[in-house]
Amino acid sequence: MGTSKEANLLARWAELAGAQASAVGEELIGRYQEPHRRYHTVTHLAAMLGVIDDLAADADDVDAVRYAAFFHDAVYAVDRHDNEERSADLAEEMLGSLGLAAELVDEVARLVRLTATHAPADDDRNGGVLCDADLAVLAADEAGYAAYTAAVRQEYRHVPDELFRAGRTAVLQGLAQQPRLFRTPTARTRYEAAARANLARELTTLTSTD
């Protein structure tokens, strides 16, 4: 692993899964460095783990949530709609090979699949923490949000502007129409207002006519 961020992620993986699982950790982290990625990268994974640390008290099994974070974008292709399912399948395969308890493997896979909708049940504490961590970027400061939107556009650089604007608008409108973006009390307090302001500004930009 070449950079400090990668080394830190590998250390976090070893802390979670044990040193004997280092080969799996290296493969996982390598996936987040695939050349077509611009947002779904090691930076996003590291940021998610940091938010999960902050929200740990809101989870029933924070280690399951951390495993799910490592796997949630392990398979990522912009031209496919089954990335979460394929990532969950990979989690089942890899974690099963490490000999983890079947109940834990099942929970990690369930959580990974949940990131397709970001709609955990009200009593799903693990799902709430994972989804909140995945969406926390929506509450970034102005520079951070601009970097996020630019990175997403780069991942879809093969899509013409008009089509991208329509697709992005639909995604953001779907989020904005939800009664709440964040599920845990801590995340709602910290992120909800800023995230809604960012969504509103981006939607205004996307839907304005020159």
Image (cartoon, rainbow, N blue to C red):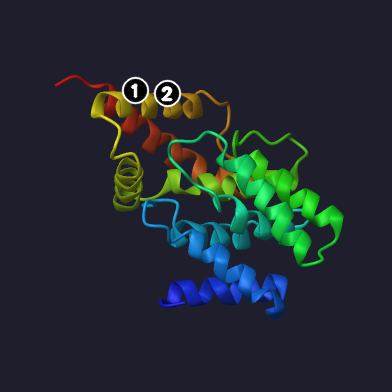
Q: What crowding class fits label 1: few (fewer than 14 Cα within 10 Å), some (14-19), or many (20 or more)?
A: few
> Is label 2 in contact with label 1 (beta carbons under 8 Å)?
yes
Q: Quadrant of the C terminus?
A: top left
| Kind of residue sitting beneath label 1 | Ala
Image-based side of 75 in relation to 17, left or right: left
Q: Position of residue 138 (x, y in %)?
A: 44, 43
Q: Is residue 35 above or below residue 183?
A: below
Q: Position of residue 98 (x, y in %)?
A: 76, 67
Q: Nearer the viewer, residue 133 or 5?
A: 5
Q: Nearer the viewer, residue 138 or 95?
A: 95
The answer to which image quadrant residue 53 occupies is: bottom right
- Residue ID at (54%, 71%): 9
| Kind of residue sitting beneath label 2 | Ala
Q: Is residue 27 above or below residue 138?
A: below
Q: Which mark is residue 95?
A: none
- Residue ID at (73%, 35%): 122
Q: Position of residue 5 (x, y in %)?
A: 45, 72
Between the C-alphas of marks 2 and 1, the distance is 6 Å
Question: What residue did someone put label 2 on?
Answer: 170
Residue 195 appears anywhere in the view: yes
Q: Nearer the viewer, residue 161 or 49?
A: 161
- Residue ID at (62%, 73%): 23
Q: Which residue sits furthest left?
A: 210
Q: What crowding class fits label 2: few (fewer than 14 Cα within 10 Å), some (14-19), or many (20 or more)?
A: few
- Kind of element beneath mark 1: helix
Image-based side of 77 in relation to 51, left or right: left
Q: Which residue sits furthest top?
A: 209
Image-based side of 145 in relation to 176, left or right: left
- Residue ID at (52%, 49%): 190
Q: Which mark is residue 166?
A: 1
Residue 183 appears anywhere in the view: no
